[in-house]
Image (cartoon, rainbow, N blue to C red):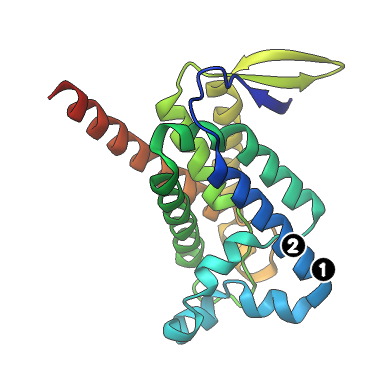
C-alpha cells in the first residue's frame, strides 16, 4: 500500500513553504554526500553531546531536521511531505505552517532524547516533523482520500486508514525499540511518535481556535 497523492481540489494557495522545505531537504542531502560523515556527525542531534553542552549544540535541533541517512529515507519523507504538507499549509497559512512544522520537529527530538539521553548515535531526518503533519491531517481532513498504489492498480483510500496504519506501526515498533535504538542506531521510532502527537495536539487546538473566531 503505497500512497501517491491526495485530493487537492479544495486547496486555495500555492504551498510555497512545503516546496521550499522539500528543496532544502534535497540540497542538504546533496551537501551530506559531498561533505561526508564528519558533516553528518557535526550537524546531527547527538543526545549525550547536546545535553552536556546545550548552548553549543542547540542549532543541531534544527539542522538535523533537514538531513537524511540515504536516498530511500529522503525520498520516502519527501513523498509524504508533498502529499500531506500542502493541505496543512493551506489550512494554517504559510508562516504558521512553518512554525508548526519546526515545533513538531523539536518535539520529535525531545521524545527521542527522552528515551536515550546517554546515546552517542546521531539523530537526523525530517520524519518527526512530517509525522506532525500527518497528525494534523487527521484532525483537519478526517474525511480526506488518498490515492494508493496497491498491486498493479491505483485505488482511493481514506487518509484515516493510510495514516492510522502508519502510526500503529510506529507505536508497535517504538515500544520494541526503546532499549535498542539509543545504543545501536536504526529508525528513531520515538521521534516519529513524538512528532505525531505534537502535530495532533497543535492541530486540534488551532482548529478549535479558528472555529471559535469564526463563530464569535
Residue shown at the point (53%, 54%) measured from the top left: 190
Q: Quadrant of residue 149?
A: top right
Query: Residue 207: which quarter of the image?
Result: top left
Q: Nearer the viewer, residue 9 or 41?
A: 9
As drawn, the residue found furthest toward the left would be 216
Is residue 36 at all visible to an observer of this figure?
Answer: no
Q: Are marks 1 and 2 in contact (CB under 8 Å)?
A: yes
Residue 173 drawn at (x, y percent): 61, 46
Label 2 CA crowd tier, 10 Å (few <14, some 14–19, many 20+)? many
Q: Which mark is residue 29?
A: 2
Q: Nearer the viewer, residue 161 or 36?
A: 36
Q: Residue visible at 58% across and 75% down?
A: 46
Residue at disc 2, secondary structure: helix
Inter-mark Cα distance, 1 to 2: 6 Å
Q: x and y percent of residue 99 in the render?
A: 41, 53
Q: Looking at the image, is 97 positioned above or below residue 69?
A: above
Above or below — where is 116 with respect to 151? below
Taking the image as shown, residue 165 lies to the left or right of residue 101, namely right
Amino acid at each position: 500500500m503505497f500512497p501517491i497523492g491526495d485530493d487537492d481540489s479544495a486547496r486555495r494557495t500555492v504551498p510555497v513553504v512545503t516546496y521550499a522545505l522539500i528543496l532544502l531537504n534535497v540540497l542538504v542531502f546533496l551537501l551530506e554526500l559531498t561533505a561526508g560523515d564528519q558533516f553528518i556527525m557535526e550537524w546531527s542531534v547527538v543526545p549525550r553531546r547536546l545535553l552536556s553542552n546545550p548552548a553549543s549544540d542547540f542549532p543541531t535541533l534544527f539542522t538535523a531536521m533537514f538531513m537524511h541517512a540515504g536516498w530511500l529515507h529522503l525520498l520516502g519523507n519527501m513523498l509524504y511531505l508533498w502529499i500531506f504538507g500542502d493541505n496543512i499549509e493551506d489550512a494554517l497559512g504559510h508562516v504558521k505552517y512553518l512554525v508548526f512544522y519546526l515545533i513538531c520537529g523539536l518535539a520529535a527530538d525531545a521524545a527521542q532524547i527522552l528515551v536515550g539521553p546517554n546515546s552517542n548515535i546521531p539523530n537526523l531526518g525530517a520524519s518527526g516533523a512530517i509525522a506532525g503533519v500527518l497528525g494534523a491531517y487527521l484532525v483537519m481532513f478526517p474525511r480526506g482520500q488518498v490515492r494508493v498504489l496497491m498491486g498493479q492498480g491505483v485505488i482511493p483510500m481514506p487518509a484515516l486508514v493510510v495514516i492510522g496504519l502508519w502510526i500503529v506501526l510506529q507505536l508497535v515498533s517504538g515500544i520494541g525499540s526503546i532499549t535498542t535504538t539509543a545504543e545501536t542506531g536504526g529508525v528513531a521510532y520515538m521521534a516519529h511518535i513524538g512528532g505525531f502527537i505534537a502535530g495532533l495536539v497543535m492541530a486540534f487546538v488551532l482548529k478549535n481556535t479558528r472555529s471559535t473566531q469564526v463563530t464569535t
